[in-house]
Structure formats: structure tokens, C-alpha cells
Amino acid sequence: MGRKRVIDQEAILDAGEAVVARDGVTGLTLEAVAKQAGISKAAVIYDYKSKQAVIEAIVERAFRADGQQHEQAEATLPTGDSIAIRGRIKVAAQPPPEAFKPVALNLSAALTLDPLLRKRMQDSQAVAIRRIIAESASPRGAILAYLALEGLKFLEYLDFHHFDADERAAIIREIGWLVNATPGTD
């Protein structure tokens, strides 16, 4: 009978995120992850055979967390029209956590350069867009709201621009207004 495994995969991924935030994707090594986690390199290799496997696991965990966050937000909303986009707006009402911004910035490089990770992002976006369109009384307004929301998130997560709290709250309200807009009906 073997020994019971005591190293938590989540702790390894937490360490990987910390390395990515501090050193970027290019600075992520299995040794750096092990050192950050306070474990041996062999323990990291046991679960993640390569640097690429660690990066993929971090990205997948971020996708899962994002999906869970949207599901939880949707569960708090009254049932009805445009729940998919309204859940996303509710989540985006809070600015991104400062600690995750450098991770998001550095992982964006990996998403851009790696065709498989980029495909994962493309698939995720396609699912979200199809759902938003299908569940909205005004699909065009909802997709415009989604584009505005993603633009806001892009600026914030990649640390390109910060709106003060009042301006940001107004932008979120106005994105909500877009959901039921019907463009071209002047």
C-alpha cells in the first residue's frame, strides 16, 4: 500500500499563478513552482509533467472559476429574459481583483501564442455568445452589451485603464441598458 498523497493540486496551481504574476509565463518553470509551493520539483512533476501542463491547468482553472462565478450570479437573478448577459454584468459590477491582474496579463500572452489555449478561449467565447443571443429578447442589444462588457474587462484585467468607482458604476448601468436596446430603430 502506497503513501497517502498530501500535496494539494490547487496549492500547486496557486504557486503557479504566483510565479506567473511575478515572473511572467516565460519565467514559469517547474522548479519555480515547486519553490513557491514549498515542495519538491518531483511533487510538481507527479501532477504536471511540463511547464505547458501547469499553464494549461492554470488557464482551465480560471475558465472553471469564471463559469462558476457566472452561474452563481445567474442563480441570484429573477428568471426571465437575458439572464446570461445579466449574470455577466452582475459579476462585472465588481472590479477585477488586483492580485489577479498580473496573472491575467501574463496568461494573455500564453493564450495568444499557444494555438490550443487560444482555441479553448475561442470555444468559450463562442458558447457565451451563442447563449447570450439565444436567451435575449433583443439579441443585438445583448451582444452589444457583451462587447462593451468585454471591452471594460479587457481594459481593467490587462491594466490598460482604470475608471474611478463612480464612472465605472455608471458604465456598468449603461451596459445593462444596452441589453434590451434595439439598434437601428431610430
Image (cartoon, rainbow, N blue to C red):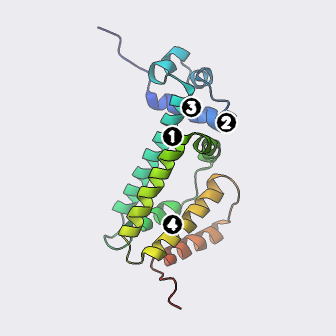
Q: Please, what is the three-letter code of the amino acid marked with disc 3? A: Gly
Question: What is the C-alpha distance between the residues marked 3 and 4?
Answer: 30 Å
Disc number placed over residue 24 in the picture, else none: 2
Of badges 2 and 1, nearer the viewer stands 1
What is the quadrant of residue 174 in the picture? bottom right
Q: Which residue is painted at 69% across and 61% down in the image?
A: 162
| Mark identifier at residue 116 | 1
Distance between the alpha carbons at the discs numbered 2 and 4:
29 Å
Q: CA distance from mark 4 to mark 1?
A: 24 Å
In the image, what residue type sits under mark 1? Leu
Query: Mark 4 packing: few (<14 Cα in 10 Å), some, or many (20+)?
Result: many
Q: Residue at x 53, y 64 (%)?
A: 93
**What kind of residue is marked 2?**
Gly
Q: Which residue is mark 3?
A: 16
Residue that carries the numbered disc 4 in the rendered image: 146
**The furthest residue to the bottom:** 186
- Secondary structure found at label 2: loop
Mark 4 or mark 3, which is nearer the start of the sequence? 3
